Amino acid sequence: TYGITLAGELVEEVSGLPFETYLRQNIWQPLGMSRSSISVPADRQDDVAIGYQLKGLDLAPQPWEWYHTTPASSVNSTVADMAKFLIAHLELGQGGGGRLFSERTAREMQRQQITMHPSMPGWALGFYEDRVGLQRVLEHGGNMAGFSAVMVLIPTENAGFFVVNQFEGSQLRDDLKWMLPERFFPAARKPRP
């Protein structure tokens, strides 16, 4: 989180723009992500989803949570907007009818950058690496009050998905990360050596 936050500070310094403005001009608008922001606009305050947690047997609404580690967190978006972002990564930088970033940059972002051991999944740029059976997947997820989310890319299959659901720390996102690749991709059903 702190490394990504520092990178965001560098983006601001080099571009001369506030981070949210940079995202809007260089990512969200080109991709047509019209419902993505860090600061929720006043006219959308009533349109923000409410997260819930179980309190005993009852659902308890959670207060709005905002992290102070932007840009590593705090992007508010919709599933439709996140699909556009996911597709841009699968299309190696293409999106919104143009090129968002170079194919070389996309491949570098998806390449394993570091691992603790060659037989273990590691980290790419902005993504965690994992294996479902023999199928390599890239993911980035998170939790906040009342919500759990994950974006999963399966670059070799040109596939991916984004899921967000109620309950912070929910296991649903992890279950789907395993079940969907196993259902659709034979390599995911093969056991790791």
Image (cartoon, helix red, strand yellow):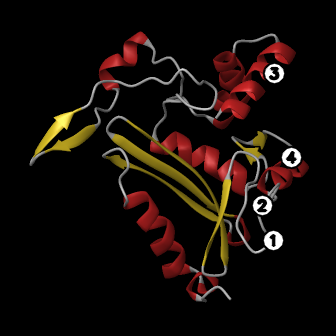
Q: Which residue is mark 4?
A: 105
The kind of residue tagged 3 is Leu
Q: Position of residue 94 (x, y in %)?
A: 77, 47
Give the distance between the C-alpha atoms of the residues marked 2 and 3, in whole angstroms.
25 Å
Among numbered discs 2 and 3, the one appearing first in the sequence: 3
Q: Which residue is mark 2?
A: 115
Q: Position of residue 33 (x, y in %)?
A: 57, 33
Pair 4/2: label in front: 2
Mark seen at residue 45: none
Pair 4/1: label in front: 1
Q: Which residue is mark 1?
A: 118
Give me the residue at 31% from left, 38% from top. 146
Q: Position of residue 54 (x, y in %)?
A: 19, 45
Give me the residue at 60% from left, 24% from top. 70
Label 2–label 1 contact, CB within 8 A: yes
Pair 4/3: label in front: 3
Give the distance between the C-alpha atoms of the residues marked 1 and 3, in whole angstroms.
31 Å
